[in-house]
Structures are given as C-alpha cells and as structure tokens.
Image (spheres, rainbow, N blue to C red):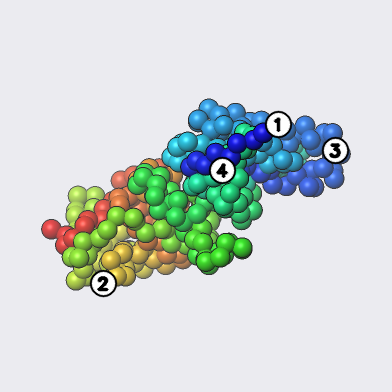
C-alpha cells in the first residue's frame, strides 16, 4: 500500500535532443547505446551535485534536488560536461541535451513524485531546445545574485495549460559569440530605492557617476560620445546605456558587438540587442575582455542617487 507524502522539492528533467534521426540512421540497438551513454554521463553529474535520479523514460530522466541552487548548478555542469567531452558526437550526429527544472510542492508516492511542480518542470524541458536550460521566471527571480545574473527572460513564451501566463527564463551556461537573439535579463528581486538607481562607469583611469537625472550615456569612437573608447574595434556610435524607469538598458548599435561579463557569469556577445544591466560587470567594447582587458569598461548599479 502506497503512502502519499506531501513535500517541497526541486524537479529536473533531462532529455536527449536529436535521437529520432539517430535511431533511424544507426538502428535501435546502436542508437540506444548512444542515448544510454548520454543519459549516463548526465546522470553521473546530477548525482555528484546532490541530485537523486528518480526514473528514466525513453530518452529522458527525472531527478530531484533538495536544494534549488544545487539543481541550477547541476544543470549548468551537465551541459558543460556534455559539450567539453563531445559526448553526443557520433559520426555526423551531434546530440544535445534539453534540461528543464522547477521547484515547489509535490506528492511523493512509491519513490516517485507527482503534482503541479512535476508537470511544470516537464513543460520547461519541452520548451527547451537542444543545448538549453529552461526554468520558470519565478524560480529565476529567487536565485542568489550570482546565479540570477546568468539567467535571462524569454519574453512572450507561453506555457500551455498553465492557466495564467507563466514567465519563462533561460539559464545561460554558454553563449556563442555570434548570438543574435534579442532579450532582456530578469529584473532583480531586491526592492529599489525611491531615489532610483545610479550607474557607475569606470574606463581606464576615469570614473563617471550618473543618477536618475541622466537619461542616456553614449559610448563610442566619436569624439561627441559621453565616454570615448578609441580603438580599432569600436564603432563611432557603438552603444548607448539608456535609463528606463529604475533600470539601465545597454543598447548595442555596433558592427563588432559589445561583450558582456556579468558577475558570476560567462562572457557573451550582443549585437544590435538590448540588455537590462544588473549589479556589476564589465563591458568589452568591440572586443572580448579576454583579448583586451585594458579596454574593459566596468559598470556598477547603485541603489538610490549616485554619490
């Protein structure tokens, strides 16, 4: 006789993307061995990060975590391990993993878990593309600053069958330099001061402080720019940091892009995109910070009027 036990837990699904063609091209036995190896590597990482494997269904497994941060870290570690070791590379086939997770109340019965949280985590993995990690905006909002900085909102994504619109967020674990998706990061969960947020910029030996009275700051090679960044990779009108309400939004106008490193996250490149700045970070104007740290522009958001 089973006993239904209510509890609160994190639920993660990991699915192998691209396996349908693999089964068709290699045959069932060979394809199954490849898929099993992919899930085995992912499962080992999940368990090393404190997760517990619950079940495997076809090309997908379900795991649970007591700790939300550990679950987020595990998802990132799985994707990095999978890419670094080329686990899904079989001939011309390049398998990837889709990961989705959520946290909340569930019912445990016979070493399995049921309920809305499980269903929501399943919807997150269904939304993910190969190589993506997807979670809810609610969960992303509640992450510590270090992890929250590595999430971005997926605007306009609707979760079917969830009643009210459910916000969806992607966990950024690796972003290619030629990424062109338009996005904005999730806003911080901390309350803002009624005085608004200030923006501190540091470039080489100079520092600028901007408060809510300033509507925009221009960056570029043009001498008329508020902050002149003069090197061969910078466009004349490279980027603008614009105030919108209590947020500062970075808008790239350039050819070579702006390389963004948020605190605790990997560097990524944005071109002709907008990004809501948060906390602290560094901007590579036209070139990766790793190649040209001397020309990095540091930013920090302050609470209240910049002083």
Which circle marks residue 107 in the picture? 4
Tell me the residue at 69%/46% (across/down).
17
Depth-wise, is mark 4 or mark 1 nearer the camera? Answer: 4
Dot 3, crowdedness within 10 Å: few (<14), some or many (≥20)?
A: few
Q: Is residue 82 left or right of residue 265?
A: right
The span from disc 4 to disc 3 (Cα, nearest Å) is 35 Å
Depth-wise, is mark 4 or mark 2 nearer the camera? Answer: 4
- Counting from the top left corner in percent of width and height, residue 284 is at 37, 52
- Counting from the top left corner in percent of width and height, residue 134 is at 54, 51
Q: Is residue 147 left or right of residue 241?
A: right
Dot 4 and dot 2 residues touching (CB under 8 Å): no
Residue that lies at the very extreme toward the left in this rendered image: 307
Residue at label 3? 28
Tell me the residue at 43%/40% (across/down).
69
Most foreground residue, 11 or 111? 111
Residue that lies at the very extreme toward the front in this rendered image: 1
Dot 1 and dot 2 residues touching (CB under 8 Å): no
Which circle marks residue 215 in the picture? 2
The span from disc 4 to disc 1 (Cα, nearest Å) is 30 Å
Residue at label 1? 37
The span from disc 4 to disc 2 (Cα, nearest Å) is 50 Å
Q: Is residue 174 visible?
A: no
The span from disc 1 to disc 3 (Cα, nearest Å) is 14 Å
In the picture, which quadrant includes the C terminus? bottom left
Dot 4 and dot 3 residues touching (CB under 8 Å): no
Tell me the residue at 26%/53% (across/down).
300
Q: Is residue 240 visible?
A: yes
The numbered mark, 1 or 2, whose residue comes first in the sequence reads: 1
The span from disc 1 to disc 2 (Cα, nearest Å) is 54 Å
């Amino acid at each position: 006789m089973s006993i239904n036990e209510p509890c609160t837990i994190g639920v993660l699904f990991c699915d192998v993307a691209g396996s349908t063609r693999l089964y068709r091209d290699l045959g069932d036995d060979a394809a199954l061995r490849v898929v099993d190896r992919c899930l085995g590597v992912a499962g080992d990482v999940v368990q090393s990060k404190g997760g517990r494997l619950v079940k495997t269904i076809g090309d997908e497994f379900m795991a649970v975590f007591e700790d939300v941060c550990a679950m987020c870290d595990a998802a990132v570690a799985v994707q990095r391990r999978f890419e670094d070791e080329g686990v899904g590379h079989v001939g011309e086939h390049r398998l990837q993993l889709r990961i989705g997770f959520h946290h909340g109340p569930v019912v445990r019965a016979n070493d399995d878990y049921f309920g809305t949280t499980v269903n929501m985590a399943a919807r997150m993995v269904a939304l993910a593309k190969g190589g993506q990690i997807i979670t809810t905006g609610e969960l992303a909002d509640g992450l510590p600053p270090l992890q929250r900085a590595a999430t971005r909102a997926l605007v306009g994504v609707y979760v079917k069958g969830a009643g009210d619109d459910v916000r969806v967020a992607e966990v950024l674990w690796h972003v290619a330099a030629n990424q062109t998706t338009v996005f904005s990061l999730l806003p911080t969960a901390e309350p803002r001061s009624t005085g608004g947020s200030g923006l501190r910029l540091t470039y080489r030996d100079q520092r600028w402080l901007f408060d809510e009275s300033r509507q925009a700051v221009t960056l570029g090679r043009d001498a008329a720019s508020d902050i002149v960044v003069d090197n061969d990779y910078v466009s004349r009108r490279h980027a603008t940091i614009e105030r919108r309400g209590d947020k500062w939004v970075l808008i790239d106008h350039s050819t070579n892009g702006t390389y963004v490193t948020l605190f605790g996250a990997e560097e990524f490149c944005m071109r002709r995109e907008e990004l809501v700045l948060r906390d602290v970070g560094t901007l590579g104007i036209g070139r990766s910070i790793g190649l040209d740290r001397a020309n990095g522009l540091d930013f920090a958001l302050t609470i209240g009027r910049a002083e």
